[in-house]
Image: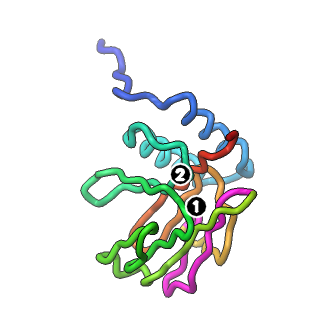
Amino acid sequence: MNAPRLPSTLPSVRQLREAYHTLSGLPARNPGFATRLQYVADLLNQAGDLPRSDLLVWREPDGAIHHAIISEPFVVGRSAGPPGLAFPEDTLLSRTHFSISLAGEGCVLQDLDSKNGTAVNEPGERVGQRLLRDGDLVLAGNHIFAFLGQRRGE
């Protein structure tokens, strides 16, 4: 009988600590939580070393994992310019779909009156404005972004 194979790269102590903070910060009854946590864990496992900054991490249709450091102003949409993210091929995104701003308590997501809305963690949980927590999933257009708030403790 063969022993189970471990992934070639295991999460770092910092990544495990972030997962713990995500776990401890959520309400006890959340049916989609296990799926969301698995999605974030898979991204972290495959992303390799990430900068110690607030990040959005996502997977492209070809399976490639990308990340972007959140700096101000940070806008995501079909035609958002640097330092934001532009996805011109995603017709479900508005030209400027949502923004993330740095605030004293963390990062605040703001929907920019997008046509199809921005959701956090659940497709039906559309938001106008929301303080993001480590591990939150931002659903916009055809993309799912994992938010990693990594400035804590500096």
* Relative image position of residue 133 (x, y in whole percent): 65, 54
Q: Which mark is residue 75?
A: none
* Relative image position of residue 125 (x, y in whole percent): 62, 70
* Relative image position of residue 25 (x, y in whole percent): 72, 47
- The residue carrying pointer 2 sits among few (fewer than 14), some (14 to 19) or many (20 or more) residues within 10 Å by Cα, namely some
Q: Are discs 2 and 1 less than 8 Å apart at CB?
A: yes
- The residue carrying pointer 1 sits among few (fewer than 14), some (14 to 19) or many (20 or more) residues within 10 Å by Cα, namely some
Residue flagged by tag 2: what amino acid is it? Arg
Q: Residue at x 59, y 56 (%)?
A: 136
Q: Quadrant of residue 78?
A: bottom left
Of all residues shown, which one is farthest toward the top? Answer: 1
Q: Which residue is mark 2?
A: 36
Magenta region: which residues?
105-122
User: Which of pointers 2 and 1 lies earlier in the amino acid sequence?
Assistant: 2
- Give the spatial CA distance, label 2 vs label 1: 7 Å
Instruction: Determine the secondary structure under disc 1.
Output: loop
